[in-house]
Amino acid sequence: MKQQIYKPASAFRLITVILVLLSVTLVLVWRAVDLHVVRKAFLQDQGDSRYLRELPLAAHRGMITDRHGEPLAISTPVDSVWVNPAEFATAQPEWPRLARLLNLDVNEIAQKISQRQDKEFVYIKRHVEPARAKRIMELGIPGISLQREYHRYYPMAEVASHVVGFTNIDDQGQEGLELAFDGWLSGEAGSQRVIRDRLGRVVKHVELLKKPRPGKNLTLSIDRRLQYLAYRELKRAVMSNRAQSGSAVILDVRTGEVLAMVNQPAYNPNNRGNLQSQKVRNRAVADVFEPGSTIKPFTVIAALQSEDYSANSVIDTSPGYYQVRGNTIRDIRNYGKINLTRLIKKSSNVGASKLALSLEPEKIWHVFDQMGFGMPTSSGFPGETGGLLKPAVTWAEIEQATLAFGYGLSVTPLQLAKAYAAIANQGVINPVSFVREDEPVQGRRVIDAEVANTMTRMLESVTNEGGTGTRARVPGYRVAGKTGTVKKITSEGYTGDKYIAVFAGMAPASDPRIAMVVTINEPTGDDYYGGQVAAPVFSRVMGGALRLFDIAPDNLMDDKIKFASLPNKAAGEHP
């Protein structure tokens, strides 16, 4: 038997094979260590990302209600459709089916995807109703997912739009009280971890990471019934008089609560596709105007509080006009010698000017300042303006004379309503509130109680026979108020054919509970006086308000009033 001899080449091959096998083994061992130890956390995260997702949990916004709990703004659940572009691109033949369900153009979808190919999250359409969203997921298109969100809905639409405002698509307040109370109404989103399948559908909820916190509800002072009534009557007046715009504000005299606030033109917050600034703006707090004759009661109050005058003090207005530094102030007729009550009843510009010039400017300014003219009402409403009231030290003689009948200063409808509410509240002015007040309100005395009551009786004469505001009467109730017809000013001075018709008042006059201001901007035609245009709106709305709030009549002996007993031009109202 021959002995086998191993050649060196064979031994080399054997060693090489062993080394190769050993190297492979070492590589495999290192790879196992790398995967299971060194890169374990990273790889687990990568694996989880393929089927585990952390999704936000939307928190619904707080509801806004009127003072009786009726909804003015509510949030309803909707779904927003989003995709992962990389996965969604693999199913391009299915895009037309999706486009039809979403009422979109396929090219529009393609453009969104092409612009965000490097993203993992791209919205296709926001706020889709849940039923349609379910049909979209049933298509089984890869990369499509849903995200639960909330859509804001406004049941009263344009009737309460200027007060409530609206939110954007992300549920953030943009206008009105939605903006003013955004922090209060907004919720805090939560999050959860879920398992998705290969089509992106949620197949299992793994854990709740953060519980969503819903927003807080907000109860307004608005009464939706009165809001609707005021909106209807203001819109009717603006349309019938072919006016440019109008506003109406109604306040609770005892609390300062805003019971209703409406404007024309209005807008629908449920359909904001073509919003215009002139419609969105809340004119009742943002637009200023010269108040005209509605300021005369405060001039008279300054005189009464000086203790140099009483309601029966006489002013000689003859011969019906008055020269001040080369400027002529006129009445519609010569009223002769009149007392302060008749000055208010007939709305005498001459009488108001002579009265003002007999007083120290600081005394008039003090009353106007105490009423809040020249400063915001501090209601907190976004965009509120303060108007204009110049310091008394700057007044020229003609300025003091014209301020007495409402020219040379500017106010908002809300400011004017607040001032008249102070008269109605026996001289105590209350803060303006858009939120329901459940506790007693602490006001501030700005007029002597006796003077305020005297002025209320003077203002009641305006709505009686021979006054300028007979059309403001409410059957069964005593009404106090003041008309105003203001010439508008342009870059070329005061116009002779553009006016603002105003009526400000309160009822019932025996114990006032509600104050109201109505303004109609640029009524056309021959009827443009405040007593003709604004007073009837006051009458219809105030009558409804008194009944809605179950306020007892105080004039049962006069429940068959003839509203048109005297034409207002004959009643002597001055423009």
Image: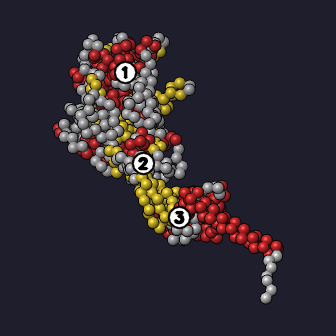
The type of residue carrying mark 3 is Tyr
Between disc 2 and disc 1, the foreground one is 2
Question: CB atoms at circles 1 and 3 under 8 Å apart?
Answer: no
Q: Is residue 418 visible?
A: yes
Q: Name the N-terminal-most of marks 2 and 3.
A: 3
Query: Which residue does the image show at 44% across and 63% down from the upper left?
Result: 205
106 versus 432 height, above or below: below
Task: Kindly identify which residue carries mark 2.
Answer: 188
**Closer to the camera in the image, 494 or 268:** 268
Residue neighbourhood size for the residue with mark 2, other residues' Cα within 10 Å, grouped as few (<14), some (14–19), many (≥20): some
**Percent coordinates x, y for residue 272 in the rendering:** 50, 50
Q: Name the N-terminal-most of marks 2 and 1.
A: 2
Circle count = 3
Q: Is residue 343 left or right of residue 192?
A: left
Task: Kindly identify which residue carries mark 1.
Answer: 369
Query: Which residue does the image show at 43% across and 21% down from the upper left?
Result: 389
**Closer to the camera in the image, 319 or 464:** 464
Query: Residue lying farthest bottom?
Result: 1
Label 2 to label 3, Cα distance in Å?
A: 26 Å
Q: Is residue 27 left or right of residue 379?
A: right
**Percent coordinates x, y for residue 171 in the rendering:** 46, 49
The type of residue carrying mark 1 is Asp
Task: Kindly identify which residue carries mark 3.
Answer: 51
Disc assigned to residue 483: none
The type of residue carrying mark 2 is Glu
